[in-house]
Image (cartoon, rainbow, N blue to C red):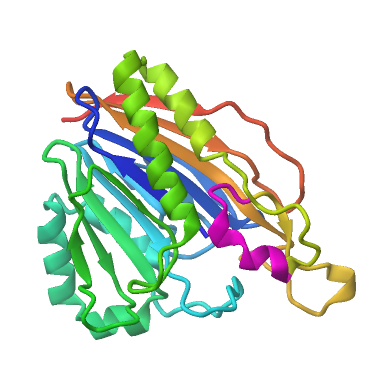
Amino acid sequence: MCILVLSTKHPKYPLILLSNRDEFFVRDTRDADWWDNNQEIFAPQDLAKDAKGTWIGVSRTGKISVILNIREDASHDERAPPARCSRGDLPPRYLASGLQPKSFIDQLLRETPYDSLKNDYGGFTLVCGDIKTKQFYELRNQRTDPSVPAVVKIDQPVFAVSNALPGEQEWPKVNMAQQALSRMIDDAIENDWSEEEIVSHAFDLISKDTMPQNLNTPHQKLMHLKNTIFVPPLQTVVPSLTDIAVDSLHGVFYGTRTQTVIIADSQGQVRYCERTLHNKDSLENTDRLPKITAFSIL
């Protein structure tokens, strides 16, 4: 139940982006770095699948991409069988393409017709952007209503998305995050916050936990994931009491495991800040300070 919220409204910083990756803690993941097989891409990698793709990344030329799952049923079952194609393959394809966001999406739809994207991939929202041109588009491969467009230009000064189906009522966590980032940007402008202050406040924003404390069962907690920006560790199964399989994709604990803040200034300097909270299937918190990588857009 991940969340992405971004803003282009700050006059000094054409992009401020915040992301929470909510996932099973057992899933093997490499921290963000320049990729061995493509030094133009800076991104984490999901090592649990053969595609070794990513959910978020930036290129040296200022391209940026994020992909989020779409929750396709009301049960919020995180243990659905895998689709034929990996969603994590799409962001690096865009980052390596050299194309503008809309051109890449158009090319993707020519090469893989919409019905194939719908049937071969799990539900997704793919966000493709360009920091230099401030162009951002989203592509969604699942819709509750065929009249809802699959490709949309993102032109809001503050935009947020999570895992709801297009056409479904927006989740409370999305509205909370969008309003909170808008207020944060206003405060940053009014008080002339430094980059360090913006990053600190951004991590505070995506660490807001509004999960009710009186929920007793994993199912009750899973049903409330749409109400909290930050998902605290949830024990989804008790191995000694169930025959549900625990494997390299689906473990015991689930929640927000990686937080990312990306800030780009008007001079083409990018600061990529990543905080890994959990990297093994336990309640142990890595308690890391954010790892910060700075580089210039070419």
**At 41% from the left edge and 54% from the top edge, which residue is drawn?**
55
**At 24% from the left edge and 27% from the top edge, which residue is drawn?**
13
> What is the chief secondary structure element of the magenta stretch?
helix
Q: Nearer the viewer, residue 169 or 162?
A: 169
Q: Point out the image quarter for the C terminus.
A: top left
| Picture layout, residue 195 above or below residue 115 | above
Q: Nearer the viewer, residue 241 or 154?
A: 154
| Picture layout, residue 273 above or below residue 102 | above
What residue span does the magenta drawing correspond to? Answer: 219-231
**At 17% from the left edge and 54% from the top edge, which residue is drawn?**
97
Residue 78, can we see it?
Answer: yes
In x, y percent, where is residue 2? 49, 55
Q: Is residue 90 left or right of residue 281?
A: left
In x, y percent, where is residue 9? 23, 34
| Residue 281 belongs to magenta span | no
Q: Nearer the viewer, residue 54 or 158?
A: 158
| Residue 226 belongs to magenta span | yes
Answer with the quarter of the image where residue 261 lies.
top left
